Image (spheres, helix red, strand yellow):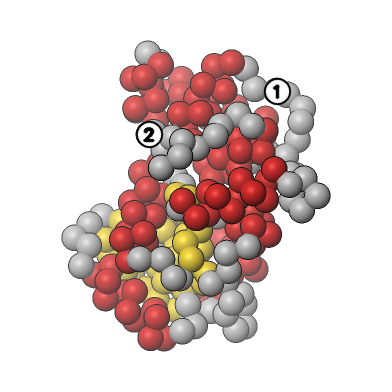
């Protein structure tokens, strides 16, 4: 069962989303809230797997809430829900530690896909978000990567990185490379350490930035 929290100050949108998610048999909406402070307060006593987080909320916005979640609840995955489609928002949120970014104009299936992808592989980029990120990351005048250039990845780590970007699970990567899941996790931890990424989504941002991975055209 995937346990979710919804944080959005637009009541109609939030309730509609809760009803939509209620039709997913393997998803449980544990709680809803209208701002970042409420979200953090609930998380102390009601653990969840994924938070669907709006950016623009009163009292405490999504960006501020994200920083607290990463510090206080690093195990919780975050999917940002926003009206913004500009690369400065998307890339910045990914660098802060978001696991996915879905625009509010997306079809309901996109939100379902994002939840399942984040639950299994740790991140989700829609086609739109992928295009926007690539446009921003190649334009070094607009978006400057904050990752360290020291300790370059080994060839094996780059192989693991590319498979992570393809949304393969640890078990699937292990099977493909004829390694044990424990060895794959070791490579993943090394990648996180060397790149400075906070999570799987950050690894993908690094891969795109360095030209180590290019998504196949759909």
The residue carrying pointer 1 sits among few (fewer than 14), some (14 to 19) or many (20 or more) residues within 10 Å by Cα, namely few
Instruction: Name the outermost residue toward the right.
Output: 141
| Residue found 36% across the figure and 44% down from its top | 120
Q: Left of 153 or right of it: where is 200? A: left
Q: In the rendering, at what x and y percent does residue 38 appear?
A: 51, 78
Circle 2 SS class = loop
Q: CA distance from mark 2 to mark 1?
A: 23 Å
Say whether residue 204 is visible.
yes
For label 2, the residue is: 169
In-front residue for pair 96/209: 209
Q: In the rendering, at what x and y percent does residue 73 appear?
A: 53, 56
For label 1, the residue is: 152
In-front residue for pair 106/28: 106
Q: Left of 195 or right of it: where is 79? A: left
162 versus 29 height, above or below: above
Circle 1 SS class = loop
Q: To which quarter of the image does residue 13 belong?
A: bottom left
Q: In the rendering, at what x and y percent does residue 26 appear?
A: 22, 57
In-front residue for pair 165/61: 165
| Residue found 60% across the figure and 50% down from its top | 133
150 versus 34 height, above or below: above
Image quadrant occupied by the C terminus? top left
Sequence order check, earlier mark of 2 and 1 = 1
Image quadrant occupied by the N terminus? bottom left
161 versus 114 height, above or below: above
Q: Left of 176 or right of it: where is 141? A: right
The residue carrying pointer 2 sits among few (fewer than 14), some (14 to 19) or many (20 or more) residues within 10 Å by Cα, namely some
Q: In the rendering, at what x and y percent does residue 82 appear?
A: 52, 69
| Residue found 77% across the figure and 45% down from its top | 140
Instruction: Name the outermost residue toward the top.
Output: 178
């Amino acid at each position: 069962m995937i346990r979710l929290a919804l944080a959005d100050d637009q009541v109609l949108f939030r309730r509609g989303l809760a009803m939509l998610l209620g039709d997913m048999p393997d998803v449980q909406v544990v709680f809803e809230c209208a701002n970042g402070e409420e979200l953090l307060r609930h998380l102390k006593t009601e653990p969840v797997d994924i938070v669907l987080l709006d950016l623009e909320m009163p009292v405490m916005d999504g960006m501020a809430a994200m920083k607290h979640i990463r510090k206080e609840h690093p195990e919780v995955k975050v999917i940002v829900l926003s009206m913004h489609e500009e690369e400065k928002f998307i890339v910045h949120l990914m660098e802060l530690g978001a696991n996915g970014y879905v625009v509010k104009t997306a079809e309901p299936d996109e939100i379902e896909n994002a939840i399942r992808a984040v639950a299994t592989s740790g991140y989700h980029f829609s086609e739109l978000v992928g295009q926007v990120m690539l446009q921003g990351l190649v334009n070094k005048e607009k978006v400057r990567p904050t990752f360290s250039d020291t300790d370059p990845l080994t060839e094996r780590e780059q192989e693991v990185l590319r498979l992570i970007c393809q949304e393969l699970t640890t078990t699937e990567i292990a099977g493909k490379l004829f390694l044990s899941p424990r060895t794959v996790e070791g490579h993943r931890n090394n990648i996180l350490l060397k790149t400075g990424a906070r999570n799987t989504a950050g690894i993908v941002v690094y891969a795109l930035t360095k030209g180590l991975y290019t998504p196949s055209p759909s």
